[in-house]
Image: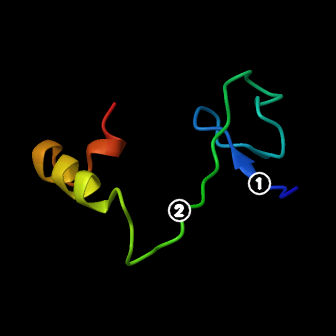
Amino acid sequence: MKVRMRKCPECGRYTLKEVCPECGEKTVVPIPPRFSLEDPYGKYRRKLRKELGFFYRFKK
C-alpha cells in the first residue's frame, strides 16, 4: 500500500487523509502523473488543451 501526501485545494493544508480535517473538503494528490511516451490518453489531453486553452485546469 502506497501512502501519498494529499493536499486540500480549499485551504492548502497537507494531510494523509481523504478529507481535510480542517475544512472538510475532499483532498487531492498534488503530484502530476508519471510521464510515458506510450501514453494512451495523451492525444485526447492535448486536444482538450487546444480547445479550452492551456490553463483550463486553473480557471474557476
Find residue 1 and report its image quarter: bottom right
In the figure, is residue 25 to the left or right of 4? left
Judge by depth and name the residue closer to the eye, 8 or 28.
28
Q: Which residue is mark 2?
A: 33
Q: Residue 14: percent from the left, percent from the top?
A: 75, 48
In the figure, is residue 7 to the left or right of 54? right
The kind of residue on which mark 1 rests is Met
Judge by depth and name the residue closer to the eye, 8 or 3.
3
Is 31 placed above or below 55 here? below
Find residue 43 and report its image quarter: bottom left
| Category of crowding for the residue at label 1, using alpha-carbon neighbours closer than 10 angstroms: few (below 14), some (14–19), many (at least 20) | some
Find residue 19 and report its image quarter: top right
Q: Residue 48: percent from the left, percent from the top?
A: 20, 47
Q: Residue at x 53, y 62 (%)?
A: 33
Q: Residue 11: percent from the left, percent from the top?
A: 64, 35
What's the mark number on residue 5? Answer: 1
Q: Residue at x 25, y 51 (%)?
A: 44
Q: Residue 23: percent from the left, percent from the top?
A: 73, 23
Instruction: State the quadrant of the C terminus.
Output: top left
Question: Residue reaching furthest bottom?
Answer: 37
Q: Name the front one of labels 1 and 2.
A: 2
Q: CA distance from mark 1 to mark 2?
A: 14 Å
Is 4 placed above or below 18 here? below
Judge by depth and name the residue closer to the eye, 33 or 52.
33
Q: Residue at x 64, y 50 (%)?
A: 29
Q: Name the secondary structure under disc 1.
A: loop
Q: Earlier in the sequence, mark 1 or mark 2?
A: 1
